[in-house]
Image (cartoon, helix red, strand yellow):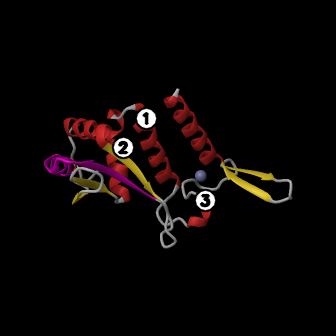
Amino acid sequence: MANQDFHWTPEDLAWAAGLFEGEGCIALSRPAATRPQVQWNLVLASTDLDVLERLQTVVGMGQISGPRDRGHKLHWVWCVSRREHVRLLLEAMLPWLGSRRRARAEECLAFFEANPPGMHRSSLCKAGLHVRTEENVRVSVDEQGRVRRRCIPCAQASSRRYYEKTREVA
Ligand SMILES: [Zn+2]
């Protein structure tokens, strides 16, 4: 889909991506029983409201809430939760993101690609993240004869997280 609503200059995007790279987060909310799909949000918390207001103006999306004082300092939160906005902004910022955040952004975009709006939850894995396909599901039978289905992308992600954690400690 063309980007009709937003007119970003490369400078806008580079600035927004730089800020997002430092403080932002591509956050995933788990599906509630009432919602068929997980929701991806772009979130950025800051103690400087004016920074968030500038971000909101520059990218033309997102809502600012606060102030909140959970933790130690008073802060505000900018959040984009509309699926189409999340997709457009991530795609646009992609070239400026570092490898780790880019991998996360690509995971989110791949999810959107694989999950058109309105897809039912039962077609997704337990985490609500991956479409159940033959390639994505490993079927095995345990000693009691019960059939187990494991989501391969979920298993890979958890072993990658384990690897990164042990590497950080070392
Ligand atoms: Zn999965």
Instruction: Check the image and report above or below for 66 versus 11.
Output: below
Tell me the amino acid under the disc marked 3: Lys
Q: Is residue 21 at least partly visible in the picture?
A: yes
**Tag in front: 2 or 3:** 3
Q: Position of residue 5 (x, y in %)?
A: 24, 54
Q: Is residue 118 above or below residue 28?
A: below
Within 8 Å of ligand 1, the CB of disc 3?
A: yes
Identify the residue position indicated by label 1 in the image: 100
Closer to us: mark 2 or mark 1? Answer: 1
**Horizontal side of residue 16 vs 122, given as left or right:** left
Range drawn in magenta: 39-58
Residue type for callout 1: Arg
Distance from Cα at disc 1 to Cα at disc 3: 25 Å
Label placed on residue 33 = none
To which residue does mark 2 refer?
91
Question: Which residue is rendered at x = 57% and y = 53% of the image?
Answer: 130
| CB under 8 Å between discs 2 and 1 | no
Sequence-earlier tag: 1 or 3: 1
Give the residue at x 32% y 44%: 24
| Residue 73 is a magenta residue | no
Q: What residue do we see at 20% from left, 35% from top?
A: 11
Q: Nearer the viewer, residue 144 or 4?
A: 144
Disc 2 or 1, which lies upstream in sequence? 2
User: What residue did someone put label 3 on?
Assistant: 126
Pointer 2 with pointer 3, Cβ within 8 A: no
